[in-house]
Image (spheres, rainbow, N blue to C red):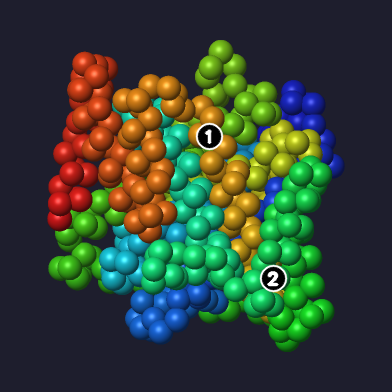
């Protein structure tokens, strides 16, 4: 095992890799609760049962797909990079595709499946690099920041910090509400932990918030600690029913598939380079085994959709494991094993309510908008499409709409600026596709 993962060449040990894998798991364990709550639209009342996924099945799908993704990444690409259902993409799945568009969740899973297959084919053929390179960096950064704003907005809604206001659309919530105060406490404690540099601060913030909630009677005590995993049958293989439904084959669903594909492109590639740079893997602006890392992501997405969850992607929280000493894929394998063990802790995780998870969403949103500093805001032809991409996501409650607006405006502003030749032909094709999507 040491020889396979090149422990000696990379100067690492079993102890460092196990610590790194465990640290990464703690930093991203919140997804075991946040993802089921998001995909089941737990905070949306009076939703038809047909549009609501089964919580237990999604919990199992989340843990299993994360474990599989970590195993593939660890053994195939040999990088200390953990995978799980991505935040932002799960929000797009639930709040845009299902809630706003009214598409059955089986259709959304089918779209994830197709995007995963496309991602795999594009990676194997080398077309992936051409598509990514055709999209300007500023729009890639704006997409990530916009998703961060959208996630934070959803977190504030779930916590009732932001509520509906008939006069101004949105307004501040009721801070006399104990649940709101619990969420605010969670935000404060999570921020304190992260500012102090504590690894797994998001996870520990949720634990502390849940404990405080139980002490004050705001969170119900768990009925147990360990139990058999819930049944996966409500979601396993459910996506295949979409292929026999004529309503699945539409222009709007094509835009959904493209959104899953594009966002996964940006998210995975950006996270891979960021963590690889931190670990010192990038040499001469090249990353060894990059193709294998991207294949890991696409295979995990395909498997995850079959089990019943949204797109699987690399997690930037892996950087906490690297900081703790992880340098090989063995750390990812350790993280995967921990995800499997979490399958038997579902009763304990029942204490994680919306007030407890909202701080995690808000803080992750803060981390994702950090990319704004790299956008050339002094270039107006760049600033306009980047700003519209970012701001339209939370304002329209749709990641797809934000991407569509930005991708339509970018060629337009570049043409007006006299820089039409600097725009890749692929971007003009994207603009036409998204213009049709907006007009539909």
Q: Position of residue 259 (x, y in %)?
A: 33, 48
Q: Quadrant of the N terminus?
A: top right
Circle 1/circle 2 CB separation < 8 Å? no
- Describe residue 166's horizontal placement relative to residue 289 as left or right: left
- Choose top left, top right, bottom left or bottom right for residue 105: bottom left
Residue 36 visible to the viewer: no
Circle 1 sits on which residue? 371
Q: Position of residue 238 (x, y in %)?
A: 36, 71
Q: Position of residue 268 (x, y in %)?
A: 49, 40
Q: Residue at x 56, y 49 (%)?
A: 365
In the image shown, does 143 or 309 lie closer to the viewer?
143
- Describe residue 103's horizontal placement relative to residue 394 as left or right: left
Q: Quadrant of the C terminus?
A: bottom left
Residue 133 is labelled as none
Residue 312 in the image: above or below residue 138: below
Residue 181 is labelled as 2
Kind of element beneath mark 1 = helix
Q: Residue at x 58, y 78 (%)?
A: 230
In the image shown, does 133 or 359 lie closer to the viewer?
359
Q: Position of residue 346 (x, y in %)?
A: 66, 75
- Describe residue 147's horizontal placement relative to residue 359 as left or right: left
Q: Residue at x 50, y 58 (%)?
A: 153
Q: CA distance from mark 1 to mark 2?
A: 30 Å
């Amino acid at each position: 095992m040491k020889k396979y993962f090149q422990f000696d060449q990379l100067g690492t040990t079993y102890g460092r890799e196990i610590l790194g894998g465990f640290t990464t798991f703690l930093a991203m364990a919140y997804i075991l609760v946040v993802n089921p709550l998001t995909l089941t639209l737990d905070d949306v009342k009076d939703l038809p049962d047909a549009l609501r996924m089964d919580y237990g099945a999604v919990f199992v799908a989340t843990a299993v797909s994360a474990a599989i993704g970590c195993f593939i990444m660890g053994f195939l690409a040999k990088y200390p990079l953990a995978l799980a259902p991505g935040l932002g993409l799960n929000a797009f799945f639930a709040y845009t595709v299902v809630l706003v568009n009214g598409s059955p969740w089986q259709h959304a899973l089918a779209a994830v499946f197709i995007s995963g297959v496309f991602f795999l084919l594009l990676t194997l053929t080398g077309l992936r690099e051409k598509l990514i390179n055709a999209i300007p960096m500023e729009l890639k950064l704006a997409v990530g920041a916009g998703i961060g704003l959208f996630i934070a907005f959803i977190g504030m809604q779930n916590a009732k910090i932001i509520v509906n206001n008939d006069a101004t659309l949105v307004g501040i919530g009721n801070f006399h509400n104990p649940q709101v105060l619990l969420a605010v406490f969670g935000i404060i404690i999570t921020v304190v932990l992260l500012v102090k540099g504590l690894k797994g601060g998001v996870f520990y913030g949720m634990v502390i918030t849940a404990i405080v909630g139980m002490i004050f009677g705001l969170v119900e005590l768990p009925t147990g600690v360990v139990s058999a995993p819930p049944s996966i049958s409500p979601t396993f293989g459910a996506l295949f029913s979409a292929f026999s439904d004529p309503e699945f084959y539409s222009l709007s669903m094509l835009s959904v598939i493209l959104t899953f594909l594009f966002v996964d492109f940006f998210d995975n590639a950006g996270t891979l380079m960021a963590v690889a740079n931190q670990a010192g893997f990038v040499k001469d602006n090249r990353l060894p085994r990059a193709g294998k890392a991207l294949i890991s992501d696409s295979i995990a997405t395909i498997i995850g959709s079959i089990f019943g969850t949204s797109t699987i992607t690399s997690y930037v929280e892996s950087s906490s494991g690297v900081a703790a000493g992880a340098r090989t894929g063995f750390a990812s394998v350790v993280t995967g094993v921990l995800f499997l063990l979490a399958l038997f802790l579902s009763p304990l995780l029942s204490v994680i309510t919306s007030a407890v998870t909202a701080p995690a969403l808000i803080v992750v949103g803060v981390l994702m908008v950090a990319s704004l500093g790299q956008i050339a805001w002094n270039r107006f032809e760049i600033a306009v499409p980047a700003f519209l991409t970012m701001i339209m996501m939370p304002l329209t409650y749709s990641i797809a709409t934000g991407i569509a607006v930005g991708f339509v405006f970018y060629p337009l502003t570049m043409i007006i600026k006299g820089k039409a030749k600097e725009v890749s032909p692929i971007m003009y094709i994207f603009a036409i596709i998204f213009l049709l999507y907006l007009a539909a």
